[in-house]
Amino acid sequence: MTTLENSYRDNLPSKFYSDQLPTSVPNPETICFNNNLARELKLQEELSNPELAIHFLSGREVLKGTHPIAQAYAGHQFGQFTMLGDGRAVLLGEHVIDSHRFDVQLKGSGATNYSRRGDGRATLSSMLREYLMSEAMFHLGIKTTRSLAVMKTGESVYREQVNDGAVLTRIAESHIRVGSFEYARFYTDQLAAFTKYVIKRHDPDLLESENYALEFLERVMNRQIDLIVNWMRVGFIHGVMNTDNMSIAGETIDYGPCAFMNAYHQNTVFSSIDKQGRYAFGNQPRIAHWNLAILANALLPLIDKEEKAAVEQAERVIQTFPDLYETSFYKMMMNKLGIVNTSMENRKLVDELLVLLQNHQVDYTNFFVSLRYKSLEPKLLKDSLFQDWLKKWELAQTRNDGSEEGLMLMDQSNPVIIPRNHLVEEVLKEAVEGDVESFNKLVAKLSTPYVQQEIQHIPSGFDRSYQTFCGT
Ligand code: AMP
Ligand code: MG
């Protein structure tokens, strides 16, 4: 990182960003630093000088010759179109290592041209939350932005109460979103240049394609399907799947009001602002589909000069979403059940199970582990419908070519531990009070979610009143 590149700034017209330095903070202090990620990015030596690291990761100083920016974008927030942009983030630049390019972004680093009424700041608690959740997702094997460090700024941030301010260093394949395309579409003469830049960065093999925009749409769709199926695998609820929070690279991004579901229910919502349940657990695939239609709409002028023909072609791609999603979803659920052969009959097994889990409010994570180790909850075993289901599952298992393979699939697909809401809140509370030991311990524990270990017990009733808040 002797230097950082900035291909975004170098290749795109100035409409797409504002030059923006992070705001200097009075008294930076390292709260957590991700040694493993620093090593992966080959940054550990450069950041080994704590003084230098503190200055750089808090935004007090930027590297010589770099040109930090805030990116402009738009988005549909709860269905409404809005012009947006990095209101509390600055892209320091791009770190290129072994021909991979990563954005290095500071989040919570002060106001920008896009801050609107916001203060550009973030609280220590919310940045630690993003650090913990994103690292947990990474270790669950799910594509995500990563967190390199959280620095306390020494400044207060005012929300409902006075909080310590903090800056998170976020690492991403890029911060280009569906909303970035909505922004580019707004300036139609820039759309082709923008799309080609993005394709060169994320899908360079498509550059020579006859209809690069259409193929790009398909790629983004496939990446989203893969991502959402993985969220459904572990019970992750993003909470605010606005189009500006959907990454073109297919990474989970913007850990605001996200949470993991305990008791299985399709309608689970934790976000305090999601009153209608638009972003409920079971709605996530439909929303991804909706967001992709917004992307398709933005790309129309590049798909075909004739609008009608463009719409037809885009629709043909977008209409494949439900089937592709279902195939991928059921394959994933079969893996969770250790069933090697994915037949239509076995799809029914999945549907029946989900109804049973929902009716009995069974813990989603613990169920699959208890099925694997045949230590099922008595409340389930008492239900004759579940007994019938269990017999069918056992039969499907015995039909596997090798039972070992089934068990292996279960072990690979079913985490034993996830960031349980009550634990996350507990360690965050201690961390903001100055004791990061439990926080660090939980982060470390979440780095081996698939290792055989004791299951987590959930305090009863905790989730009933549990609420999460947007990027506070
Ligand atoms: P989010 O819901 O976190 O994805 O944020 C939506 C938009 O609001 C983005 O453009 C953010 O940059 C902006 N935003 C969120 N929090 C703040 C803040 N504290 N100050 C300024 N802008 C913010
Ligand atoms: Mg966002």
Image (cartoon, grey):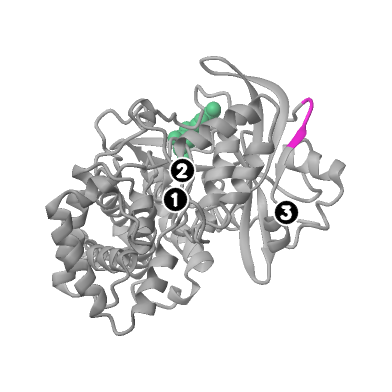
Q: Are marks 2 and 1 in contact (CB under 8 Å)?
A: yes
N-terminal label among 3 and 2: 3
The residue beneath circle 3 is 35
Per the picture, the main secondary structure of the magenta-coloured stretch is loop
The residue beneath circle 2 is 73
Query: What is the C-alpha distance between the residues marked 1 and 3?
Result: 28 Å
Viewer-nearest of discs 3 and 2: 3
Q: Residue at x 30, y 40 (%)?
A: 279
Q: Identity of the amino acid at label 3? A: Asn
Under circle 3, the secondary element is: helix
Q: Residue 384 at x, y = what percent?
A: 12, 53
Does the image show residue 238? Answer: yes
Q: Identity of the amino acid at label 1? A: Arg
The residue beneath circle 1 is 177
Figure check: 47 above or below 263: below
Query: In the image, is residue 130 part of the stretch drawn in magenta?
Result: no
Q: Residue at x 26, y 74 (%)?
A: 397
- Say whether residue 228 is left or right of residue 29: left
The range drawn in magenta is 26-30
